[in-house]
Amino acid sequence: MFREFIHYAIPSVFAMFISSLYVIVDGIFVGRGVGSLALGAVNLVVPLSIFFFGIASMFAVGGGALISDSFGKGKIEKGINLFREILIFLFILSFLLSGICVIFSNKIVLFLGANEKIFNEANTYLKYYAMFCIPNIIGISLSSFIRNDGNPNLAMIGTVSGAILNVILDYVFIFIFKWGIKGAAIATGLGQICTVVIILLHFILKKGYLSFGRSKLHKENISSFIKLGFPSFFTEITFSIIVFCMNLAILKIGNENEMASFGIINYLTTIIYMLLLGLSFGIQPLFSFNYSAKKFEKVIYFYKFTIISSFAINIFYFCISYFYGYEIIDLFTHNKFILHETYIGLCLFNISFFITGINIIQSGYYQAINLPKNSNIICFLRSIIFLPISVYIASYYFGLKGIWLSPFFSEIFSFITWNFFLKKIKK
């Protein structure tokens, strides 16, 4: 059983680790090359970028489940048509989202909480970032589809190549061309295009069943994609809501320096959040298969071992942040005030991930055994119910330190509430 766990969990966790690393390097270039104000501006747009990722994940997971089901039943043509339908719908949707964000960028950043000092930088970043919405969403979705179509190595190569190009172009655009925050957004977009171009080799060389072509859109299919993939979207969007609520609270009681601190914290905590998601996503097939086969002892074993693994990951990450936090944060900024405030915020924020890991794994477990309603309830408690309340009360009584601790309060209240109701349901 341990070998099975390693076989499924490690590749997923490693892929998430690589993705989060390039995000951190991207933040280092922005902080060093553009300044602390730019870090705050990028952080303000983070909820929207996570939203795009959530949209892509929703259709990749929901559509992928239906396509795999069709292939498993020998209905190859049906699976291919479903893939084409998803791709056409995502292309239209991403085109509309791109247009809306570019045209109404000023209103969107104001809604996200931008003040006078951070408005121009945030507006510029959003405009150029949104121009690449199509390769962003399509690239994430195609990576998932070709992984399910028997080509996980190419999906990994595409993701890593896009990340490397992004880092290289960050240096060129920010330090050589002096394009500022605009350069960071363009570098990210071109990296996404690189990922898509490499993934297209799967279809050009006909490495699997999936192929491009015409297809009609059917409401019932789109509805099924959304229904099956919504828990994945909700899991992603939960982090977006957390960042959004905390951004508003920080801008209310702090200034651009505190926003820059939160920007650095978000860059650094991306790695632990992605690792926990990777652990949850990677182990879901084992939950699904053994639950369907009624091998409940194995389900319990994998569940417990996943929880233990999340704790091990969190302990390692917390120790690295606690003992080497100042040195790591110094890579982003030399501002002593931001450096000190970020270190305190990072250590307090990291406490929440011990409970976040359990909640994410519980949510993924219910999705894996085809109980998406339970998964959605957990996400709803974490993001919609307890987080805004925690941010408001904690910031009122404890100021900035309360904001850093608010995710912990939200996660622990969500965990207690859900497990209380779960015991009632079992009885």
Image: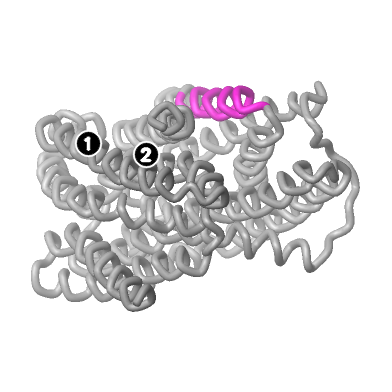
Q: Position of residue 151 (x, y in %)?
A: 67, 26
Numbered label attached to residue 317:
1
Check the picture and name the quadrant holding the C terminus. bottom left
Q: Quadrant of residue 224?
A: bottom right
The boundaries of the magenta stretch are 151-167
Q: Residue at x 55, y 29 (%)?
A: 159
For disc 1, the neighbor class at 10 Å (few under 14, some 14 to 19, many from 20) is some
- The color scheme shown is one colour
Q: From the image, tell me which residue sits under label 2.
A: 275
Check the picture and name the quadrant holding the N terminus. top left
Side of 100 relative to 119 (left or right): right
Determine contact: label 1, label 2, CB under 8 Å. Answer: yes
The amino acid type of the residue labelled 2 equals Leu
Please tell me which residue lies in front, 221 or 107: 221
Q: Residue at x 57, y 51 (%)?
A: 292
- For residue 299, say whether it is visible: yes
Q: Quadrant of residue 243?
A: bottom left
Please tell me which residue lies in front, 171 or 78: 78
Any magenta on residue 163? yes
Q: Position of residue 352 (x, y in %)?
A: 22, 54
Q: For the stretch drawn in magenta, what is the main secondary structure?
A: helix
- For residue 264, say whether it is visible: no
Q: Is residue 388 above or below residue 304?
A: below
Side of 178 relative to 211 (left or right): left
For disc 2, the neighbor class at 10 Å (few under 14, some 14 to 19, many from 20) is many
